[in-house]
Image (spheres, helix red, strand yellow):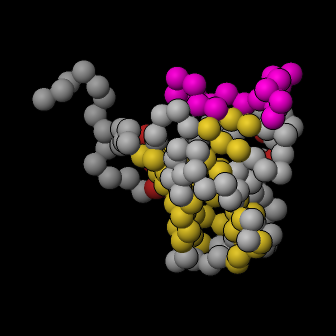
Amino acid sequence: MDTSSPAKPVAVKALEVAPRTRPSNYPEPYFSMMAGREKRTLGDLFGLTSFGVNLVRISPGGQSALRHWHTRQDEFIYVVSGRPLLITDAGETQLEPGMCAGFKAGVADGHQLVNRSGDEVVYLEIGDRTPGDAASYPDDDIQANQVEGQWVFTHKDGSAFT
């Protein structure tokens, strides 16, 4: 029995898990655009290392992320409540509770959820944790590279955010 690490819970009520303290890793001006998003990192709570699970809440007028796609990590979302718009290269798709969508790594089709309704949106976000990932943002002057497990953001020309 491993006694070197703290005990992990057996089960929790997802909405009782404290939200992530920092709403986004993006640098400004993109950081402020995530003000209407709240993430509860459920996978981390259980010590999951192969994939992550987040319970995400988007306030009216908020968005899930900048429209993006990953080079090495698959993503999956499942709508719990509310009616977010899924925006991809194909256009806008209205989602509702019980609907899901998946985004295969390496497919250059940026995606994001936007809440244009008057009600909050809640969804599960699941993604693998393949090392060496990068993310592309087709609509914004930002790119991301995973370096030693941390996201490093630069402008598309490689220059640093100041």
One can see residue 58 in this view: no
Image x and y of residue 159, in percent: 83, 23
| Residue at point 42%, 46% (across, down) | 51
Snapshot quadrant of residue 97? bottom right
Residue closest to the eye, 75 or 58: 75
Quadrant in which the N terminus appears:
top left
Spot occupied by residue 19 in the image (x, y as percentages of width and height): 58, 45
* Quadrant assignment for the C terminus: top right
Name the residue: 65% across, 51% down: 69
> Compared with residue 50, is residue 145 higher up or lower down, i.e. above or below?
above
Asked if the stretch drawn in magenta spans residue 160, the answer is yes
Residue lying at the far left in this picture: please name it. 1
Left-right relation of 57 to 54: right
**Seen in the image, is 21 located left or right of residue 129?**
right
Between 93 and 155, the one nearer to me in the picture: 155
Q: Looking at the picture, does residue 76 appear above or below residue 40? A: below
Image quadrant assignment for residue 93: bottom right
In-front residue for pair 105/23: 105
Q: Does the magenta stretch include residue 144?
A: no
Residue range (magenta)? 145-162
For the point 55% across and 76% down, the residue is 99
Q: Which of 95 and 38 is in front in this view?
A: 95
Decide if residue 110 is in sight here.
Answer: yes
Q: Where is residue 26 in the image (x, y as percent from the top left)?
A: 74, 36
